[in-house]
Amino acid sequence: MADLPRLPFERTSVLEISSAYGTLRAREPIARVRTRTGDEAWLVTGYEQARAIFADERFGRSHPDPDHAPRVSNSALTGGPNGEYATEKEVHDRMRRLLAPAFSARRMQALSGHVQELVDDLLDRMEEHGPPADLHASLSVPLPIQVICELLGVPLADRDHFRAIAEEMTDLTDPDRSAAARTAMEEYSHGIVKTKRDHPGEDVYSDLARADVPDDEIATMAGGLLFAGHETTVNRIDAGVVLLLDNPEQLEALKRDPALAPAAVEEIMRIGAPNDHGLGRYAREDVEVDGVTIRAGELCVIMISAANRDDTVFVEPERFDLGREVQPHLGFGYAIRYCLGASLARVELRAVFGSLFQRFPDLRLAVPLDGLPERSERLTGGFAALPVTW
Ligand code: HEM
């Protein structure tokens, strides 16, 4: 008997995902596969099925027997069970209650003028420096780092230190290495939170310092925010630039009308897939989804990038199109664990894509697309550099 399909499915280009996802989805939107670790799991490629699982509290990220649970990968971050089985919901509710107000759409919108200034500054420096440039190092990395440092109250001078830890955290090959890096990130961040007890400021870490929440939870939240708060956004900026350059008609439309930036951002969130990892969820009891019975303890790997190309929801899903009317993509997840930083990420991405090609209308890649250095074997994927010229 043939063995199950095994992840990751091979991709032919950094801008595409494997066609195997679509083939599988047409037949079985929830299909039995083997993960990178050889464990059996349910691969979810259908949009409705992904939403159903995201929204169903009978699925979670923890597992009653974490040492023997099936895994998505060897990442210590999202490769396997996370959190305590008995307290997952309670701890998660506490985290959302504590942090959601600080990241509300209204609070983030109020930041947009300042974020625009930061983008303008970085673009000024790029212009002064002249072509060619590494856009990754000149814009995609420094912008989210500066924004998250200001918002959390983390010293910008520490950026090289926590960037190096974040880089180790994304390791997909050695669970001990990513686990040690996660601990280092939590210890570093918790240290900063503790300094806020004596020297509070107007920032999120000062809110955490005042919160009546167990210390280990504070450390997890602080470390998680600093990591999630920049790593993902960096890769989306890079991915967006490459996608736009690869779709000259859509790029022309954006150059003519920078008010299309929000539409460009949503399309980048839908179709950009800097990594091919998938989000894990464990069934807490036997659950039937779309006719498939997922047994208690089994793993679902939700492949957002595949769900975002489901042709029952998106017309011509492979096309990068700023004119889409229907845009309910799952790029920030969905429901209970919908990305806490979605409004912040949108503010940053809109400022970037509303300005970059206005300032550099002739911007183009300085190397062929398939020559871009990929960050392989990294949880968040993306590029190590993005050489451009103009
Ligand atoms: C474009 C950039 C971003 C992308 C693509 C992204 C994507 C996601 C996704 C897909 C999830 C859901 C994970 C799951 O369901 O298991 C998530 C959750 C989360 N994101 Fe983001 N994110 C981005 C930016 C940010 C930023 C800037 C922050 C900073 C605050 C942030 C903080 C979080 C947190 C704390 C969660 C966990 C929410 C929970 O468990 O309730 N993200 N993000």
Image (cartoon, helix red, strand yellow):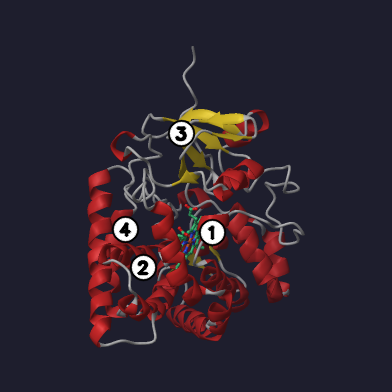
Amino acid tagged 1: Tyr
Numbered disc in front, either 1 or 4: 1
Q: Residues within 10 Å of mark 2 (few under 14, many from 20)?
A: many
Q: Are marks 2 and 4 in contact (CB under 8 Å)?
A: no
**Residue highlighted by disc 4:** 167
Observer able to see residue 51: yes
Residue labelled 1 has its Cβ within 8 Å of some atom of ligand 1: yes
- How packed mark 3 is, by other alpha carbons closer than 10 Å (few <14, some 14-19, many 20 or more), is some
Q: Residues within 10 Å of mark 4 (few under 14, many from 20)?
A: some
Q: Residues within 10 Å of mark 1 (few under 14, many from 20)?
A: some
Where residue 303 appears, as percent x and y from the top left, is 54, 43
Mark 4 or mark 3: which is in front? 3
Give the mark toward the camera: 1 or 2. Answer: 1
Q: Residue 132 appears at what percent x and percent y?
A: 46, 69
Provide the secondary structure element on which disc 1 rests: loop
Q: Amino acid at mark 2?
A: Leu
Q: Which residue is mark 3?
A: 296
The image shows residue 257, relative to residue 65, as above or below, that is below
Q: CA distance from mark 1 to mark 2?
A: 17 Å
Q: Along the horizontal axis of the image, is 184 left or right of 205?
A: left
Q: Which one is in front, 261 or 221? A: 221
Would the CB of label 2 be found within 8 Å of ligand 1?
A: no
Q: Which residue is mark 1?
A: 338
How far from the left and from the top, in percent, is residue 323?
Answer: 76, 61
Q: Real-space Cα distance between discs 4 and 3?
A: 34 Å
Which amino acid lies under the numbered mark 4 shown in the image of this protein? Answer: Glu
